[in-house]
Image (cartoon, coloured by chain):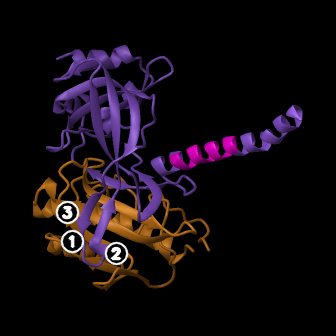
Amino acid sequence: MKKYTRRGLWPVVIAALTLTLAGQLVAQRLESGDHTHAEAHLDMAWRFRPKTFLEGRDRAPLSVLAEVLTVARGDDLISYVPNEPNGEARLPTQRITLNVLKVYRGTAAAGQRLTLFQSGGFTNDNPVPRFALDNPRYQQGERYVLLLEPAGQSGLFRIIAPEGRYHLVQGDIVTPIVDNAVTRDLRGKPLQHLEQLLGAR
Amino acid sequence: MARPGVVSAHLAGSHFHKSGAEIHFGVSNFGIYAERAEWALNNHGFMIPLLHWDRTNAHTEISVFDESFPTAEGCGYHDPQNGADGHRVHSHSVYNRDCGGNPDFVQGIYCQEIGHAWSQDHHNEQNSCMGLNYYNSDGWYITDHDNQDFYHFYRWHQ
């Protein structure tokens, strides 16, 4: 009788585990956007594009080495446009929580949390995730050297330009997020090389 | 139907599902800098004989407007909306007023975002607005190069 009862519980246990797993998957999808849609491109004309790495370096009041702790959806940027549905058009944004590992310039300290603003993501009225090709989505655990400036008066930071975002991969090898005349000489170099440029004032 | 032998280098991924001898887009234009947006729209219409703007105040294909976004990284945005089949069904071409009101600059940014709306990508053609704040171009207008891209894409593509 005892044995029979144990066997009878298995379907219940399996069903409970399945529901738990499904719930987690749904929660993850809601958090990060509906990835069943192909990602679209958000085109962006940047406020600033440096002509040299040093110009970008000197533009940034804050330069850090940081790790991505979390990536979350931010408040939409809303335009009030009479012919849009509900009289508004929405641009998606992200909030990236960074753990500062090293500071090259500016007022911050190792161990401090910074919140980064990023244009991109999805909106309720347009569930397709869209990011600029020259500012793709961040992933938890990634490490970057970032050249930052305040994002208005919001208390958030934003990268000065695509030339202000350097991904560190495979033993701290520098991978610029864009490949152009400003960043080309940095690609594939060790972090120490980039740090020398940031520190050489 | 793609025209054999014709490849355009600069067209972005998604696009409106149109082709033929005349390409019409429904376009609305609202905002403080609507006059400069109008100049940009007229420039596209003038430079691209195949392109025809159908002006409307309704919500149709391309909405052009401005707003102030002090936190944002961009002075201009193009935000596409694609249908279930992957084709573009609606586009927002936006100027960020927080970048100021220099008339030529506003027009140049609008020029670029309107180009994105019909699917043109950034490129480094000298004097084309499609490189403004992207390839250090200072162009405020599209060029014949953009016209060629538009023609090769929409005249023959389906």
Contact (Cβ within 8 Å) of mark 1 with mark 2: no
Q: Quadrant of the N terminus of chain B?
A: bottom right
Q: Is residue B93 above or below residue A115?
A: below
Q: Is disc 2 placed on a helix, strand or loop?
A: helix
Q: Quadrant of the C terminus of chain B?
A: bottom right
Q: Nearer the viewer, residue A53 or A40?
A: A40
Q: Nearer the viewer, residue B94 or A26?
A: A26
Residue tagged 3: B67
Q: What amino acid is at disc 3?
A: Glu
Q: Chain of mark 1?
A: B
Residue A26 coordinates in the image, percent (x, y): 56, 50
Residue B106 coordinates in the image, percent (x, y): 17, 62
Q: Is disc 3 placed on a helix, strand or loop?
A: strand
**In this image, B10 relative to B45: left or right?**
right
User: How far apart are the two marked residues, 3 and 1, measured between alpha carbons?
Assistant: 13 Å
The nearer-to-camera label among 3 and 1 is 3
User: How far apart are the two marked residues, 3 and 2, measured between alpha carbons?
Assistant: 17 Å
Q: What amino acid is at disc 1?
A: Ala
Please give the label number shown on residue B140: none
How crowded pointer 3 is (Cα within 10 Å; few <14, some 14-19, many 20+) is rated as some
Residue tagged 2: A85
In the picture as drawn, the residue positioned furthest to the front comes out as A1
Please give the label number shown on residue B37: 1
How crowded pointer 1 is (Cα within 10 Å; few <14, some 14-19, many 20+) is rated as many
Q: Which residues are magenta?
A: A16-27
What color was chain A assigned in the picture?
purple
Q: Residue at x 24, y 65 (%)?
A: A79
The nearer-to-camera label among 1 and 2 is 2
What color was chain B assigned in the picture?
orange
